[in-house]
Amino acid sequence: MTEHSEIVEHAHEAGHVHRDDEASKMAMWLFLFTELLLFGGLFLLYGAYRFEYADGFKVAAADMNSFIGAVNTIILLTSSLSVALSIAAIQRNQKKLCLGMLWFTILCGLAFLVNKYFEWSHEIHNGIYPGGPALENMSNGEVLYFGLYYVMTGLHGLHVIVGLIFIGFVMVFISRDKITSTNFQKLENSGLYWHLVDIIWIFLFPLFYLLH
Amino acid sequence: MSEYSESVNTEAEAHLTEAHTHGHLVGYGTYIMVWLGLVALTSITVTIAGIHLGSLTLIAAMLIAAVKTSLVGYHFMHLKFDNMIIKVFVLVCLVIFLAFWILTFSDLSFR
Amino acid sequence: MANGSLANEVSYLEYQGKHKGIAGWLLTVDHKRIGLMYLMAIMVFFFVAMTLGVLMRLEMLSPGQTIMKPQTYNSVFTLHGVIMVFLFIIPAIPAVFGNFILPIQLGAKDVAFPRLNLFTWYLYMTGATLAIVSLFTGGGAADTGWTFYVPYSIRSAQNVTMTTLAAFILGFSTIVTGLNFIVTIHRLRAPGMTWFRMPLFAWGLYATSWIQVLATPVIGITLVLIMLERFLGIGVFDPALGGDPILYQHLFWIYSHPAVYIMILPAMGIVSEILPTFARKDIFGYKQIAISSLGIALIGYLVWGHHMFVSGMSDTSRIIFSLLTFLVAIPTGVKIFNWVATLYKGSIKFSAPLYYVLAFIFIFSIGGLTGLVLGALATDIHVTDTYFVVAHFHYVMFGGMGLMFFATMHYWFPKMFGKMYNEKVAVIACTVIVIGFNMLYFPFFILGYMGMPRRYYDYLPQFQGWHVLSTVGSWILVGGIVFMFGNLLYALLKGPKASMNPWGGTTLEWKVPSPPPLENFDEIPIVTGGPYVHDKSTYIMHPSREKIHTNGGAKSAKEEAAL
């Protein structure tokens, strides 16, 4: 036990420190802004290089398998739906449905990562990686395209993993009734994070898979 | 279900009411409709990419992505029900981000 | 105003929680203890960076190699910059005094997220440790300058990766602090404290926090890209792979220019605290000062290009950035004129904090006006990368933020430690610091104008006179700083007890004991008026004793309660 719990105990008597869902939601949004700008820097780079090397980007994007990209988009959109439904379920006190929805979300997230894994291995197998034989012979625009491709989808994948961990913790809380129909801000916040991950993919998908 | 009280008298009271708020109940059907819309937009964006529209392809793809984003933000992320201040926050963030783009491209496009 | 029950409560310094001794500090979530832990860490790094600065001046005492080799000099100015910027100037005022004072000024018992607050300190320490470790590991300390410009930062054999990692972690620490402050200001203001009854220090921190949240991530990703380019050879900025080094500069300055306002806005907030206290007068133009903080923050996002006038970016954008840069002078001017007007017809009590503030206004004005020289395209091209630039940013950073840090140390010293320092010694130290400061940095303007480039360990013999003057100035400055800290340390150990309100301040931190008890207030006060009203009390410290219900005092807050 840390000193914090004691302060909270003490504070509860004084009626000061209380649960402030609005504050925690506000903090979550502010955190999402930092995530948005973290990716924002990369999107800016993408825009700049696409502007400078329009042809190279088109050639490189033609190599991508837009079918896998589209499947992954649908997977993430569906997982966003299931997170939203899980919140609607906990509000109605339907604990089982809520947990079921979150399990489904986790499955979607894992499916997304598996797809991503096969996609990356395919590229790497074809020699498209920094210093790889295929990349050596490509034009500057293509090299930059693949540099950004790996960084942006990699960072996005990392966020998927973090989002899954958040959801995992939230599920433990739900099953222990720490998150209930009157106290679900933690679930709401994890949901917000997961939707942000989805939104970033909504932009990554056309930029890397469709614009050839 | 109590609403987020807009007319609270003090911060202290505001905390009390909000701490026990249950949020808005949205029907499962609404979420599923939104999802169907998102899937439809995805298929539209894939279809458009197949047609050769030149530079319009990029604009169309980004517009569709923006519409999808606002659907996710407004419905899934409950911006619809959030206090004005959070909406203002989102707007400020987007405006600043847009400023980064405009100023960076004031360099790139005139070099 | 007498706080019968509070005066008997143990102070936050003596309070014994679950953990005793050192663990009571390392595991604390009390905003005041965290503030002090930040203070101790930050002081250590300030002295390290100051020592590096003095060594640089010593090297410049005579042309040619004086005490160090060129490579060492490169590492020394890089570390001086990295430590001063990332470990001292950016976090110092928000992390130390923001943490300590903000919740009390708002009438709250702590920040919104106390555990997150402690977490930022550990992040800070991790980043700081990495920065120090990078000195001695890998290929030796980074030699890129604190700006890490590509392509050199990709190619340098020195330990650039670890230094950028350190900067990344430190950036994360300031983001979390900023996030915490924004939520605290929105959610934890005492009943009746409307936005325009909030102390101006809180306004300064609010504007600062927004910059921290919305700008820092951009440099975060940029530094990550540098690491990835170095480690994996991914092509992003490397011109050999088609990358554009100017884009790196864009991304770097998208953060690092707003960061300049992260440094100065809290300092400006404190000026607005100290002036009304020692002028015994309500601040002149409260609303304008408050809004101008947000104005500076906003314009601060739009002017980064003025660091890149000679980088090869387009003429169009150079003109746009130059124009936008001039706009910053407007909200800054609003502040300066309002501060001076606050002194007009005040009953001024000269005291060490006020001396620092007056020195600040003078020195910062020089820094600000020379900033206009640099913001204008033609003159900037003449003095780019010369000592003129170095002089300018030391006048605004050290003369601005640094001096205000010292002012704040004196102003809130009695509140933080419950002890009083020797006023005479403090004033003498302040005088020595101001003399040493100007002697050290003013010659830089002249050297720069004559063409002395920055970041060189050697120079032409005709520059020696000014260099010697400057080096002697550095000794005087350091003497003054040591003198000042000596005085404060002595006061800490042997100083007389300070009263609750030694300066006659009007904001809430002066209504609680010195040092404050663990929870600051035994009852959340009600605010009934502005923060700088001198002739009547605008706070009800014990609403229950005076049988006032929270609704009554806060009616005027109605429209803002939803915020």
Image (spheres, grey):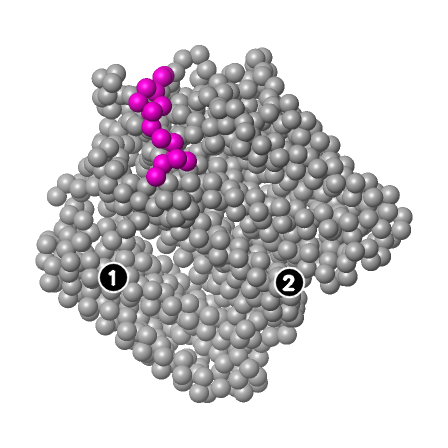
Mark 2 surroundings within 10 Å by alpha-carbon count, few (fewer than 14), some (14 through 19), many (20 or more):
many
Q: Amino acid at mark 2?
A: Ala
Front residue of this view, candidates C314 and C48: C48
Mark 2 or mark 1, whichever is nearer to me: 2
Up/down of C516 relative to A42, above or below: above
- Magenta span contains residue C390: no
The disc label shown at residue C20, or none:
none
Give the spatial CA distance, label 2 vs label 1. Answer: 41 Å
| Span shown in magenta | C1-16
Magenta span: predominant SS is loop
Protein chain holding label 2: C
* Residue C328 relative to residue A21: left or right: right
Disc 1 is placed on an element classified as helix
Residue at 44% over, 12% down: C535
**Number of numbered callouts drawn:** 2
Residue under circle 2?
A: C141
- Using the image, determine if residue A135 lies above or below residue C235: below
Figure quadrant of the N terminus of chain C = top left
Residue C310 placement (x, y as % from top left): 70, 55
Residue lying farthest to the right in this orientation: C462
* Residue C399 visible here: yes
The part of the image, by quadrant, that contains residue C376 is: top right
Q: Which mark is residue A169?
A: 1
Q: Amino acid at mark 1?
A: Phe
Queried whether the magenta region covers residue C4, the answer comes back as yes
